[in-house]
Amino acid sequence: MAKMFIHGEYVDSISNEWDEIRNPATGEVVDRVPRGNRQDARAAIEAALTAFPAWADLPFSHRGELLFRAANLIKSQEKELATLLTQEQGKPLRESIREIRRFVHTIEHYAGLAKNVRGGYIPNLDKGKYGKIIKKPIGVCGAIVPWNFPVALMGNKIGPGLLAGNTFVVKPAGTTPLTAIRCIELFHQAGLPRGVLNIVTGPGGEVGQEIIDHPKVRKIGFTGSTETGKRVMERAARELKKVTLELGGSDPMIVCDDADIDRAVSAASVGRFYNCGQACLAVKRLYLFDTIADEFIEKLIEKVKKLRVGNGLEEGTMLGPLHTAYQREEIEAQLDEAVSRGARVLVGGRRPEGQEYEKGHFFLPTLVTDVPEDARLLREEVFGPVLPIVRVKDFEEAIEKANDSIYGLGSSIWTCSLKRAEEAAERLEAGYTWVNSAQIIYDELPFGGVKYSGMGKEHGYEALDYYMETKAVVIAPGI
Ligand code: NAD
């Protein structure tokens, strides 16, 4: 039975209530976790508050060293952690391994920055005075994480945040706490002081809310849906907290008439169907130049037909189940609405048949065309394996349609024209644009959305700044 981790110890919830964690592929119970409440969250916040001064006082290099040690330990247990992740989340084992490696990379990336912290000095501000810019950790931070990448998205917050000298209370999604708990235990085995990193399981409305309401938590790193993000921001405003919001997306991918079709087809397939389409950065709308559309669609259908759907723990599985019954129903409702208004399903469009699929939330990878412009499939975030395909006559129409969304997370364009690539990078309303490249995140580059996709940055040197206070100092040595 799993437990929460507070002040360096495994603990049960104060209420002694539990929640079951079920495997989305089989419905089997993987484990039970304590159902924490506001009191448990307060205990974790107290622990983080107590640990803060000593942790903040350590040299950067010391904190970096501890992060390296934790990353090494996690690396050594990659297989076990990935298996647990597949059991609770549903993704294929090889994707779970990638997620654990991504987490390790993020932690190592920030550990490495410990030797490269920048500051500022301004000479001759005024006669006999100079200025200094100093950076300080913020204090206790809350990390609120969703279920689609429960480990990697925790890393995006605790990597820069811990290096900067903050302490944390992590709130995982209710359905995916297990691998995150185990990773946090490994941080402690690596020597992290008690109370620096705590994790509290339980409902968002209780545990998450307490983290947001508590006046001593000074920063919230939130990843989740746009709707919850708005509520988080409203509540955090009452205590004037800093917030970073990484929210929903509906990323467009544009394929021009001069694109490398085969590479673009692969990128569209991986981009849409990775993690069964449950990625903020998935390719969610595909815009094809009319002249290459037929060839592209034909090749994409062939590729998609080969994606093997199944239990993520089975060898050869390329697409796991959706994470919950609700997620699958939502996808079906979005698809039905489009089809009832004239959209055509090219492949998939239904649940797979067979005994092995009966207990899981499986859905076939789906391509759909002739989707009305105001259909839910094009207007809302589609968080599952369904890709609407739209034909466009030229570059201008592609950019216009790509930008016609409330979201602005990622975007991509495939073209051999440098002019088109540069212009798209300027004009696409998104926090990220990939040119002739699959939508993959890099720790070296800042990531974060515009419009309803959020605010603030994770990754890059920028993320470190989002976990620090900047202070100006004026010194007149002669007085
Ligand atoms: P969600 O908003 O339902 O939940 C996210 C987290 O918030 C969970 O831990 C949940 O328990 C917690 N929560 C829920 N209500 C809360 C409240 N009132 N106060 C505090 N915390 C609360 O999102 P989800 O369904 O878990 O995740 C899917 C969404 O996340 C999608 O929209 C996806 O695009 C988005 N996402 C965004 C990014 C990004 O980097 N931009 C990355 C991954 C996922």
Image (spheres, helix red, strand yellow):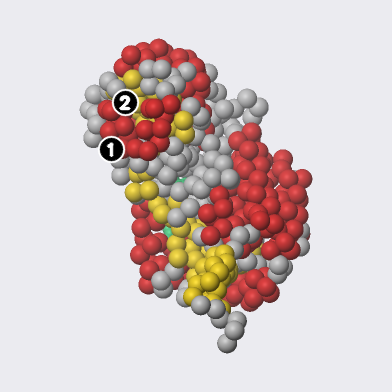
The residue shown at (57%, 27%) is: 318
**Circle 1 crowding by C-alpha within 10 Å: few under 14, some 14–19, many from 20:** some
According to the image, label 2 marks what residue? 395
Residue at figure coordinates x 34%, y 49% from the top left: 451
**Disc number for residue 292:** none
Image side of residue 447 versus residue 113, left or right: left
Whether residue 206 can be seen here: no
Of residues 388 and 347, the one nearer the viewer is 388
Residue at numbered disc 1: 404
| Ligand 1 under 8 Å from disc 2 Cβ | no
Q: Amino acid at mark 2?
A: Phe
Q: Is residue 168 above or below residue 409?
A: below
Mark 2: secondary structure: helix
Q: Quadrant of the C terminus?
A: bottom right
Q: Amino acid at mark 1?
A: Asp
112, 130: nearer the viewer? 130
Q: Is residue 293 above or below residue 330?
A: above
